[in-house]
Image (spheres, rainbow, N blue to C red):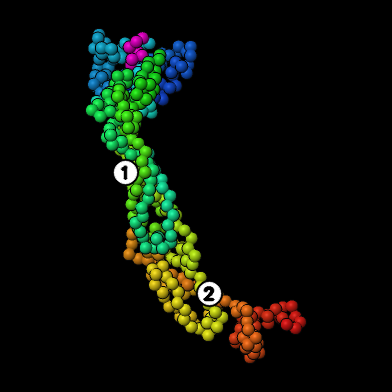
Amino acid sequence: MAKRDYYEILAVERNASEQDLKSAFRKLAKDHHPDRNPGDKDAEQKFKELNEAYEVLKDPQKRAAYDRFGHAAFEGGMGGRGAGGAGFGPDFASSMSDIFDDLFGEFMGGRRGAGGPQRRSGRERGADLRYNMEITLNDAFAGKTAQVRVPTSVTCETCAGSGAKAGTKPATCATCGGMGKVRASQGFFTIERTCPTCQGRGETIADPCSACNGAGRMVKERTLSVNIPAGVEDGTRIRLSGEGEAGLRGGPAGDLYIFLSIQPHEYFQRDGADVFCRVPISMTTAALGGQIDVPTLDGTVSRVKVPDGTETGKQFRLKGKGMPVLRSTTAGDLYIQVDVETPKNLTRKQRELLEEFEKLSRKETSPESTGFFARMKDLFGGDS
């Protein structure tokens, strides 16, 4: 019986790329795998054909020979173990191990480079750390350098992070050969699991360091300086590279992240780069006009002119007196919002003066209230 064309078996064009071949084989091998089709001789035969075809076409030299001579290139011993000898014996299991390692190894941590399986070094990167810092609005305005005390794992000074006793060093794990994983063939598949001897590190320590018990690091509290730039906002994250937890057995350290939160201010409220401040003023200042002195975040005092007839809610803008914009030379504005205060605890003389003022008042002095009650009278009728 004539053999089917390998490209036809994989359902690809003759100019298919290596990736196209792999994708086609992956899909068809899953569909016709014997485990998915128990007792199905037809599926078993198709699976054997797929394996045979892919074994040839995935190899550039074999593929070139097949493209030129067809199946004859592998007859009469030309193909060695190659395509013609594919079956469900030991050679087939070995072949399938290579294929599934090639297809699925990357999902199992078994990526292979040109030089074969990569060895593990046993050195692992340390964890990142988080530190929550609360600052004042004035700190955020001016910026500051803060000192923080962080309990963390640091490299063991006795063994310099190796985990081994002074004068010794870790040895390559004899069980996994330094890969950190061991493999076992089961039928058509290769099962990969963490090496039980070295726990995936690829190294073993016969005589561990007494100071760190072989970990290569120990807990210690450190004092670090943190530069807080002017203009930071609530929730800003500052990264200190390499200031996190020390790596395992000499591995690189993680990073330390400082998360900033800004305390509420007694007088100022922030909105981005702009700052708002509510300032109460007396009724006479609002009515007659005048000047008020207001504080700013830079510690100076700014004088604001209040025109006569100012009402509650009126805002005055002080340009450039707000928060600095991070990594910029510009700044936001400060908005002064006045709140006219009603006099309380009047003396008899003050009350008499206000009553006299009320008698002398004309419609022009309180146009809004006068107009409001006039409209109410027209709407509902009757005397106001």
Q: Quadrant of residue 16?
A: top left
Q: Quadrant of residue 346?
A: bottom right
Question: Is residue 179 within the magenta segment?
Answer: no
Magenta part of the protein: which range? 89-95
Position of the N terminus by quadrant: top left
Check residue 228 in the rendering and tell me which mark sits there, or answer none. Answer: none
Q: Are marks 2 and 1 in contact (CB under 8 Å)?
A: no
229 lies left or right of 293? left
Residue underneath mark 1: 242
Mark 1 neighbour density, 10 Å: few (under 14) some (14–19) many (20 or more): some
- Identity of the residue furthest to the front in this view: 210
Q: CA distance from mark 2 to mark 1?
A: 50 Å
Q: Position of residue 67 (x, y in %)?
A: 26, 21
Total numbered badges shown on the rendered structure: 2
Task: Identify residue type, mark 2.
Answer: Pro
Residue underneath mark 2: 280
Q: Is residue 258 visible?
A: yes
Position of the C terminus by quadrant: bottom right
Q: Secondary structure at mark 1?
A: loop
Name the foreground residue: 171 vs 120: 171
